Image: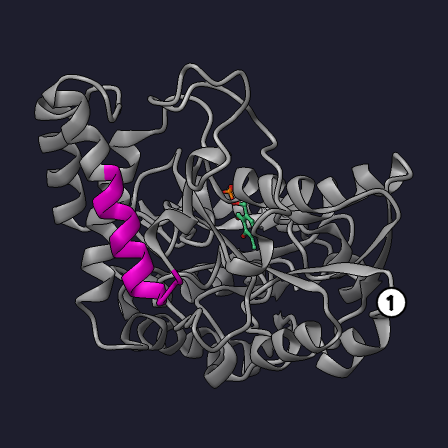
Amino acid sequence: MIYLDNAATSFPKPESVYQALDRFARTSLANPGRAGHRMAVAAERSLDAARHALNQYFHGDAPERWAFTLNATDALNIAIKGIVNPGDHVVTTDLEHNSISRPLHALEQAGVITLTRVVSSEGYVDAGAIRRAITPATRLVAMTHASNVLGTVQPIDEIGRLTREAGALFLLDAAQSAGVVAIDLRTARIDMLAFPGHKGLYGPTGVGALYVGPRTDGLIRPWREGGTGGDSSSPGQPRHLPYLLEGGTPNVLGVAGLAAGLSWVANHEPDALRRHEVDLLQIVVDWAAGSEGWKIAGRWDPATHVGALSLIVPGDLSPQDVGAILDTSFELAVRPGLHCAPYIHRNLGTFPDGTVRLSPGAFSTPEDVLAFTTALAEITAGVL
Ligand SMILES: Cc1ncc(COP(=O)(O)O)c(C=O)c1O
């Protein structure tokens, strides 16, 4: 199988991640607990080490500001539901994955918040449009760093700055950017940063992280209460981070894998992984330009792009047909459809069938991508 679905989850993982998972599962897979036996303490230490590593990589304020979550969706739900209050206004965009759109929709439907969805152009959100959407009641700007449909990277420095000037909080979904686009929490004015461990950080599924910055102190409420491996006497959730946000046994094995993935990513030159993926996409962009009918969705700008690209399917073929043929006849794994991001497909005019998205990863090769373009040419040769 030629795997070009890394925007869904990265595959394969680096060898060091498989080794770390195996080693940890065999030696240290106890339930973390500060007051427990030595294996429990060792498991707790590995969580702490991973928090330190994340904090160092993203230049956060303190390791305890990193809470481990199930995935990006979990992190985004904790952030959104933990921070908004009745009557708040929230600004978001049409690029969002349902992991932002649906919690906000649910809160809007329940009458808790009012919502403004800023419309993007060719895959990019204009910072000025965000500024115009902000009102005195705006509590939160919640948006993605890079579109999972189009791969376009958003101008978050400017958006973070103007959000802060307006006194609102900035929640960034870095599901498609963490590990491939540099994020510096010292300068980027991000108040909450959410991502999964299983995409560009090359960890396993079932783990993610949420960073909560100093401006959320005393404001963010836990969305889930429960055991934290310490402080059992208190009837309520501990007030201190990260335990405030971490009720229940964390995925310690997943965190060990995430830490190994992060260490592998951090050993690369800045921007090398993103460049590798974008160079592979350039092959597809060039091929599409000379092809019969295949079109790239959104604006292609290699400098502001991550490794995901959507193709608009020509003729009477549906993206689902193309995806199925690629899978069954060419052993190629891509993602057809709406990619859990319906609003951007409405904007592009590709709703409800969507597009065919390919997303190479760190281990993808030019040959993989050429196999994809050759297959597309063969599929369409007969029908166009
Ligand atoms: C932009 C974006 N946000 C959030 C998510 C949700 O990630 P997870 O499935 O880890 O919850 C994804 C997953 O594809 C994504 O691409």
Residue beneath the point at 69% across and 72% down:
163
Q: Quadrant of residue 321?
A: top right
Q: Could you tell me residue 279's position as x and y percent?
A: 36, 78
The residue indicated by pointer 1 is 136
Residue beneath the point at 57% across and 72% down:
152
Residue beneath the point at 12% across and 48% down:
16
102 w.r.t. 380: above or below: above
Which residues are drawn in magenta? 47-61
Is 74 on the left or on the right of 34, as rendered?
right
Magenta stretch containing residue 126, yes or no?
Answer: no
333 w.r.t. 118: above or below: above
- Please indicate, yes or no, whether residue 176 appears anywhere in the rendered image: yes
Q: Quadrant of residue 173?
A: bottom right
Number of other residues with Cα within 10 Å of mark 1, as a class: few under 14, some 14 to 19, many 20 or more: few
Q: Could you tell me residue 53's position as x and y percent?
A: 25, 55
Of residues 14 and 384, the one nearer the viewer is 14
Residue beneath the point at 72% across and 69% down:
167
Of residues 122 and 232, the one nearer the viewer is 232
